Amino acid sequence: MEIAPKINPPLRTLLGPGPSPVNPRVLQNLSLPVIGHLDPAFLKIMDESMAMLRELFQTKNRLALPMSGTGTAGMETCFVNLLEPGDPVLIGVNGVFGTRMVDVAQRCGAQVDTVEAEWGTALDPAQFRVAFGKKSFKVVAVVHAETSTGVLQPLDEIARLVHEHDGLLLVDTVTSLGGAPVKVDELGIDACYSCTQKCLGCPPGLSPVTFSERAIEAVRKRKTKVQSWYLDLSMIEKYWGSERVYHHTAPISMNYALHEALRVVLEEGLEASWRRHRQVHEVLIREMRKLEIEPAVTESIRAPMINAIRIPEGADDAKVRQRLYDDFNIEIGAGLGPLKGKIWRVGLMGHGARVENVELLANALKRLM
Ligand SMILES: Cc1ncc(COP(=O)(O)O)c(C=O)c1O
């Protein structure tokens, strides 16, 4: 067999739905010496990351840790730990990731009901009220920033309803964490997961998760074992907590990367980071309008870090995206499902949320069209 040549990935400007551009400080951490997952020096890094994650999630929850795996591992962690076969769950579906939640919950053997909205619009709290009028739900799950549509779901009203009915609120903050307010304690979110490769400016590979005491209590009261050995929080907690019991070998280098990514966000300040994402998003909307490209989502529910814009009439979707790669080394995202061929998705996330990236994209599109 001929050995393949050494890889040489192109240097892209990642303005798609993720992964986003990695902060150079984070990349440097990836080349630090690997040590053992029970080395006291690593345990200190773990403790520091947990403390910083609590800050990011705006929570005092004891359980806030990065699961090994991408955002979907965080999604599965929340569902497999909270749901037992037969448990009733209500899921908001208005894009790819709500749809994925339904699939994951069904695989847990849960009884799944849904509240649906057209892709590109927000879920309506009134529909959650109607669903609660018919039965009670152990868990209610929604996606905060629907990456497939560019909608930022308002959470206050849904959170209030869920608590009124004594349910557990599960929220996907894969795309929003670090780029928009995710106030876990203030909203009373019981289970929340995210990822490293969007607004944290880190490569994909870990999934920060936090559980409230109510959620932990629900896990404790299970009658059946969590169906996934790997994602069982009662065991993972014993490694991340004071007992330090081996569960699986933590991805050391990715944990170094996350540690630096969290430091970067907190050095900037959470509020400043949210503000930067909002400001850069506004610059994008202005620049796109100059090219007669309109946003696809109503202003009040636009997710600043993932921008759905309408493909202008006459533009060849696939060709434009290919030429952005070939001629400008820029990645943007295509539309998915019913939005395929109708929208482009422009990610301005974490280290990538900068005005110079908007200018780069606007100039490239101007040349192509
Ligand atoms: C909102 C949302 N949830 C879940 C996921 C799944 O994350 P991953 O692809 O890292 O497994 C994604 C990925 O883009 C996402 O955008």
Image (spheres, rainbow, N blue to C red):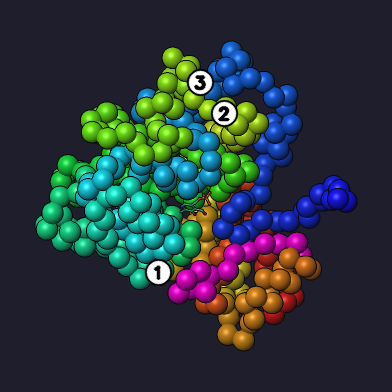
Q: Position of residue 254 (x, y in %)?
A: 62, 34
Amino acid type of the residue that numbered disc 3 sits on in the rendered structure? Tyr
The residue tagged 3 is: 246
Q: Secondary structure at mark 2?
A: loop
> Residue 332: within the magenta?
yes
Q: Are marks 2 and 3 in contact (CB under 8 Å)?
A: no
Q: Quadrant of residue 81?
A: top left
Query: Could you give the CA–CA distance between mark 3 and mark 1, rounded to whole angstroms?
Result: 43 Å
| Numbered label attached to residue 119 | 1
Query: Could you give the CA–CA distance between mark 2 and mark 3, rounded to whole angstroms?
Result: 9 Å
Kindly identify the residue that appears in the image at 53 percent across and 70 percent down. 335
- Residues in magenta, as a range: 328-340
The residue tagged 2 is: 250
> Residue 201: within the magenta?
no
Tell which tag, 3 or 1, sits nearer the viewer.
Answer: 3
Q: Are marks 1 and 2 in contact (CB under 8 Å)?
A: no
Q: Secondary structure at mark 1?
A: loop
Q: Quadrant of residue 78?
A: top left
Amino acid type of the residue that numbered disc 2 sits on in the rendered structure? Ala
Q: Quadrant of residue 114?
A: bottom left
Tell which tag, 2 or 3, sits nearer the viewer.
Answer: 3
Q: Is residue 311 visible?
A: yes
Kindly identify the residue that appears in the image at 66 percent across and 49 percent down. 21
Amino acid type of the residue that numbered disc 1 sits on in the rendered structure? Trp
In depth, the one of 296 and 37 nearer the eye is 37
Q: Position of residue 301 (x, y in %)?
A: 39, 61
